[in-house]
Image (tube, rainbow, N blue to C red):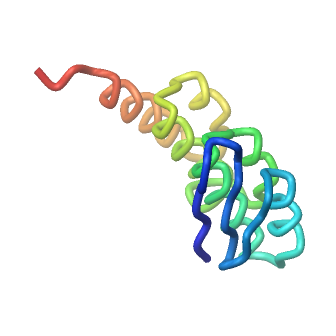
Amino acid sequence: MKIILRHKTDSLIVGGKVAVDKFKAIEECEQKVYPEKNTCYRVLAYKLADYSLCERVVEQGTAGKDMCYLSVAKMTQDVSICEKIGGPMISFKKQCFDAVRLLKEPLW
């Protein structure tokens, strides 16, 4: 599935259809069935840089909510989002902290 952020006004294209706003895109995700619904929410959370959408992902761990949080944390470079990672792999939370810190460090 392809989700494209069109403008800063949250106008999106979801699955080839124009979704006028974030709420319309969420409706599009809600109409999907597992596992496509989870994928839709993970991609939408990343594209909108909105970790609250990760809460709608049903599965935990590296394939679910935790991966969603990691992606949004890296996109926004917000290490506080890593705190939300709560799956069975504690090292995944550390990986999130390390990845965001690395992104924030200057290259020189």
- Image x and y of residue 50, in percent: 68, 40
Q: Is residue 87 above or below residue 42?
A: above
Residue 53 % position (x, y): 75, 47
x and y percent of residue 67 in the render?
57, 51
From this view, report whether residue 19 is shown above or below residue 89: below
Pick whichever, 78 or 85, lies toward us.
78
Give the residue at x 46% y 29%: 77
Looking at the image, residue 92 sits to the left or right of residue 4; the answer is left
Look at 66% across and 49% down and name the residue there: 45
Total labels: the figure holds: 0
Left or right? Give the position of 77 relative to 56. Answer: left
Q: Quadrant of residue 69?
A: top right
Quadrant of the drawing holding the C terminus:
top left
> Residue 16 appears at what percent x and percent y?
66, 79
Image quarter in which the N terminus is found: bottom right
Q: Which residue is located at x 88 percent, y 63 percent?
A: 27
